[in-house]
Amino acid sequence: MNWYCYILRCVDDTLYTGITNDLEKRMLAHNTGIAAKYTRGRCPVQLIYAEPCANKSIALKRELQIKELSRPNKLLLANLSAAPSARAR
């Protein structure tokens, strides 16, 4: 089972970082207001970054690393993952 660490951009332009083992289901939960309390009043949310992790423990550790990043660095991480050169690696 793959786990994911992800970053969302909320409608108020804030960022939310979380983990899940079902990204599609979690996105639906966030956008219908039944996921995290933080995102309930900030819908719709947009997935801007998702990183596969081997297990839940690794996903939790990665989530903490990402949460410690500044907003500009989180956006840079999301932009780099979307760049064609980053996908080719």
Image: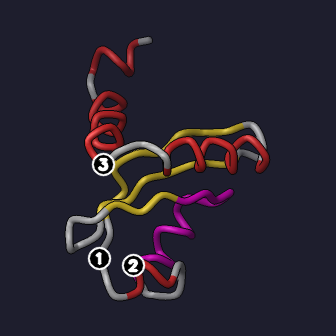
Residue type at tag 2: Asn
Please state, as top left, top right, bottom left or bottom right, where the C terminus lies in the image.
top left
Residue 41 vertical placement versus 56 (above, below): below
Q: Residue at x 28, y 42 (%)?
A: 75
For marks 1 and 3 on the same chain, the one whose residue lies earlier in the sequence: 1
Q: Which residues are magenta?
A: 18-31
Q: Nearer the viewer, residue 41 or 28?
A: 41
For label 2, the residue is: 31
Is residue 19 found inside the magenta-colored segment of the image?
A: yes
List the single residue furthest toward the left. 12
Relative to 17, is 72 on the left or the right? left
**Above or below 84: residue 79:** below
Q: Residue at coordinates 27% horizontally, 25% vertically from top-left? A: 83
Q: Residues within 10 Å of mark 3 (few under 14, many from 20)?
A: few
Q: Are marks 2 and 1 in contact (CB under 8 Å)?
A: yes
Write down the residue under mark 1.
44
N-term-proximal mark, 2 vs 1: 2
Provide the secondary structure element on which disc 2 rests. helix
Horizontal and vertical percent position of residue 39 = 41, 78
For the stretch drawn in magenta, the main secondary structure is: helix
Q: Position of residue 55 (x, y in %)?
A: 78, 43
Q: How much space separates mark 2 and mark 1, taking CA atoms? A: 5 Å
What residue do we see at 68% from left, 46% from top?
Answer: 59
Magenta-drawn stretch contains 21: yes
Question: Which amino acid, by three-letter code, is at mark 3?
Answer: Arg
Q: How many marks?
A: 3
State the CA–CA distance, disc 1 to disc 3.
19 Å
The residue shown at (34%, 60%) is 15
N-term-proximal mark, 3 vs 2: 2
Location of mark 3 (residue): 71
Question: Is 84 on the left-hand or right-hand side of 17?
Answer: left
Between tags 3 and 2, which lies in front? 3
